[in-house]
Image (cartoon, rainbow, N blue to C red):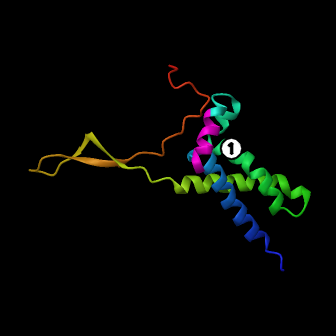
Amino acid sequence: MTDIGIATRFTLASLATWRVTHLLTEEDGPADLVARLRARLGVGQLGELMDCFFCLSIWVAAPFSLTVSRRGREVPLTWLALSGAACLLELAAQPPPAAEVTPHATVAAPGRPPFPSLSTQAFPRRRPAFENPTEVS
């Protein structure tokens, strides 16, 4: 059997990192096992980790980096690269922001009633799980 190249190993490990991280952070899993695990972990450090795709991808990428790297000194860079690739895949998998009608911005042609112009929202910033949503700044 021939050995697959590093590019193939990296691609497969990136997809696997994204898939496992997405399963743990966003899905219920078979027989709701992952949802029950998240509920059991609660609001502690591990529970918060399960709520953040970007945070969890670091830890999911760790074992996959060992399958990609052939030398020990390559592991740290591969580890971060796999997490980064999974994060890019997660951002690419999100739907584009919807166009927002802004009633205060109008465009009018002479002799015609004004109509709302469309503007797109920036990507919404995900609130980290450790921030208190009711906290007032």
Q: Amino acid at mark 1?
A: Leu
Disc 1 marks which residue? 56
Residue 61 pos. (x, y %)? 74, 52
Indicate whether residue 73 is drawn in magenta: no
Q: Residue 55 at x, y = what percent?
A: 67, 42
Question: Between residues 131 and 102, which one lies in front from this camera angle?
Answer: 131
**Who is closer to the viewer here, 44 or 78?**
44
Up the image or down, 106 lies above or below 129; here it is: below
Observer-nearest residue: 14 or 40?
Answer: 40
Q: How many numbered marks have been drawn onto this rendered protein structure?
A: 1
Q: Is residue 78 visible?
A: no
- Residue 133, percent from left and from top: 52, 26
For the point 76% across and 67% down, the residue is 9
Residue plotted at (73% across, 55% down): 81
Provide the residue span drawn in magenta.
29-39
Task: Quarter of the image for the N terminus: give it.
Answer: bottom right
Residue 29 screen position, x and y as percent: 59, 49
Specify whether residue 35 is painted magenta. Answer: yes
Is residue 116 visible in this depiction of the protein?
yes
Element class at badge 1: helix
Q: Quick one: which residue is furthest to the front in this view?
A: 31
Residue appearing at x 88%, y 64% in the figure: 70
Instruction: Tell me which residue sits at (25%, 40%) in the image.
Output: 103
Above or below 106: residue 94: below
Q: Is residue 96 left or right of residue 28?
A: left
